[in-house]
Image: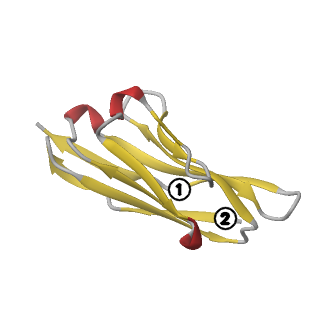
Amino acid sequence: QVHLVESGGGLVQAGGSLRLSCAASGTIFSINAMGWYRQAPGKDRELVASITGAGSTNYADSVKGRFTISRDNAKNTVYLQMNSLKPEDTAVYYCNAEGKITIIRHFVSWGQGTQVTVSS
């Protein structure tokens, strides 16, 4: 089992910043991609940003230039720095990780979610 624990959500005014963290623990052979998704009320879950073990990143168009994803491979931790937040960024943010438990056994894990609320 691989567990993901998120932290850093909260309430912030428009234009403000928040930093989310997500730490993976458990039986981990390797972690390939880590990412952040979000789900607003009444909407589907969407990819916000992802990062590979080599550091390649991918962002949703709606957050490019405002959000930055990074990871600390030694700590199995991924971060999401969110700047210039907008009310439309309000959602539950979920951490995701994909990798291997053993050399042949893969895993995909999700965090429990952390609420981000941006007031106008």
Specify the amino acid type for callout 2: Val
Q: Which mark is residue 2?
A: 2
Q: Quadrant of the N terminus?
A: bottom right
Q: Residue at x 53, y 47 (%)?
A: 35
Disc 1 to disc 2, C-alpha distance:
10 Å
Counting residues from the N terminus, which is met first, the one under dot 1 or under dot 2?
Answer: 2
Residue 58 pos. (x, y %)? 50, 37
Crowdedness near tag 1: few (<14), some (14–19) or many (≥20) residues, C-alpha within 10 Å? many
Q: Name the residue nearer the viewer: 29 or 45.
A: 29
Q: Give the secondary structure at mark 2.
A: strand
Which one is in front, 91 or 20? 20
Percent from the top left, x then y, of residue 83? 24, 46
Residue 26 placement (x, y as % from top left): 67, 72
Left or right: 93 with respect to 5? left
Q: Are marks 1 and 2 in contact (CB under 8 Å)?
A: no
- Which label is found at residue 93? none
In the rendered picture of this protein, how many numbered marks are placed on residues? 2
- State the residue at coordinates (33%, 52%): 81
**Could you tell me which quadrant the C terminus lies in?**
top left
Q: At x 29% / y 37%, what residue is drawn?
A: 89
85 vs 30, left or right, is: left
Name the residue rendered at 72%, 55% in the picture. Answer: 99
Colouring rule applied to residues: secondary structure
Residue occupying the far right of the picture: 104
Which amino acid type is marked by label 1? Answer: Gly
Residue 105: image quadrant is: bottom right
Q: Secondary structure at mark 1?
A: loop
The relative height of residue 88 versus residue 78 in the rendered view (above or below) is above
Residue under label 1:
111
Check disc 2: other Cα within 10 Å, few if <14, some if 14-19, many if 20+. some
Q: Position of residue 93 (x, y in %)?
A: 41, 47
